């Protein structure tokens, strides 16, 4: 179910897409946080002549999508003091799987869409399987992405 | 700033790749959080309390200490692949990582890769498949994964 907590998400839920402008500052911030000092990610001096984002920035897109679709658990706002303090369990990322189809550049408008492909329990923990894709506003495919996340680290039996 | 190279050097099956050795200390985890959240928020913000930065919160969630986000390892691996495969990794690379063990704050991480397969596709196109992982100071894998990229050589 959309609109609530991340733990309310169910298999088959389709996220309302998020559209945003990819700024040079956002790319540099992401790269800097990961100590990626390669010049391609901080300016236009690269094979494409435009500042390009790291492929892993799909992780940031996932956060944007959840922020817009899980209104009772806005983790960006909660972790930066811009919204209600988070009361839900921490979500534990378990698997990242991204395939690049084209680069994304500063100044492009991106559209992030996706769905919950599966939700299942394994060894006492609940998992969500996300399937996301990122396209430019004019339809060019940038990244396809699958992500497994554990809804809480502590097992049900340990609570 | 480091200058990246667009066109990669050919690699043989079995060739080893490596990235930096990094101690995942509290400052790094905070900087990582600042960068991720700033990129997602679309403005400069600072990370507050979460299981990567807050000892008490981490313990309340059943963790022994703050842990590194698995994406930190993933990003180090991605940086290693960017340096090995240049623009081709940005254009068509694939990377899968599984976060198989918690990485407590102050863990030493080593970033590693090995070419598993090299296939000639014709017209100078070559597809590489790699095993990639990060390991702690005791040589124990904490993140395991694989990668693929097609290049023109």
Image: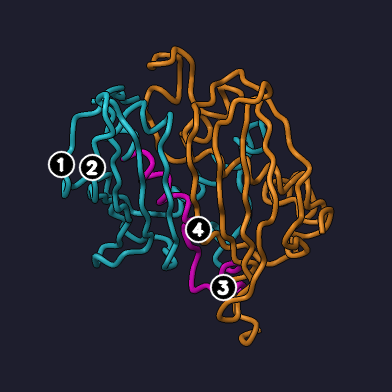
Range of magenta residues: B56-80
Chain-order first, disc 2 or disc 3: 3
Residue wearing tag 3 = B59
Q: Quadrant of residue B90?
A: top left
Spatial distance from mark 3 to mark 4, Cα to Cα?
22 Å
The residue to which callout 4 is attached is A95
CB-based contact (under 8 Å), mark 3 and mark 1:
no
Gap between marks 2 and 4 measured at Cα: 25 Å
What is the display colour for chain A?
Answer: orange
Q: Residue B118: which numbered mark, if any?
A: 2
x and y percentages locating residue B141 in the rendered image:
32, 64
Give a yes or no on whether discs 4 and 1 share a subunit: no
Vertical placement of A50 versus A10: above or below? above
Query: In front: mark 2 or mark 3?
Result: 2
Q: Identify the residue at image location x=66%, y=31%.
A: B43
Label 1 crowd (10 A; few <14 / some 14-19 / many >=20): few
């Amino acid at each position: 179910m959309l609109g609530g907590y991340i733990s309310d998400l169910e298999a088959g839920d389709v996220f309302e897409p998020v559209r945003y402008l990819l700024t040079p500052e956002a790319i540099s911030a992401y790269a800097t946080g990961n100590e990626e000092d390669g010049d391609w990610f901080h300016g236009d001096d690269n094979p494409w002549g435009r500042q390009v984002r790291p492929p892993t920035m799909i992780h940031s897109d996932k956060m944007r999508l959840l922020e817009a679709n899980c209104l009772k658990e806005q983790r960006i706002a909660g972790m930066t003091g811009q919204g209600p303090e988070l009361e839900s369990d921490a979500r534990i990322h378990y698997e990242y799987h991204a395939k690049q189809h084209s680069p994304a550049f500063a100044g492009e408008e991106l559209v992030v869409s996706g769905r919950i492909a599966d939700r299942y329990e394994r060894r006492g923990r609940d998992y969500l399987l996300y399937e996301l894709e990122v396209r430019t506003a004019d339809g060019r495919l940038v990244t396809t992405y699958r992500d497994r996340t554990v809804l809480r680290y502590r097992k049900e039996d340990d609570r | 700033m480091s200058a990246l190279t667009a066109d990669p050097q050919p690699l043989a099956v079995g060739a080893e790749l490596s990235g930096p050795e990094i101690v995942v200390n509290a400052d790094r985890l905070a900087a990582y959080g600042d960068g991720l959240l700033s990129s997602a928020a679309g403005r400069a913000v600072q990370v507050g309390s979460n299981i990567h930065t807050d000892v008490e919160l981490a313990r309340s969630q059943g963790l022994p200490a703050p842990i590194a986000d698995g994406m930190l390892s993933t990003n180090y691996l991605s940086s290693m692949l960017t340096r090995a495969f240049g623009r081709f990794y940005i254009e068509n690379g694939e990377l899968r990582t599984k976060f198989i063990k918690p990485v407590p704050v102050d863990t030493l991480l080593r970033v590693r890769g090995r070419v598993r397969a090299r296939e000639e596709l014709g017209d100078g196109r070559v597809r590489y498949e790699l095993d990639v992982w990060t390991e702690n100071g005791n040589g124990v894998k904490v993140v395991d994964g694989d990668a693929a990229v097609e290049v023109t050589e």
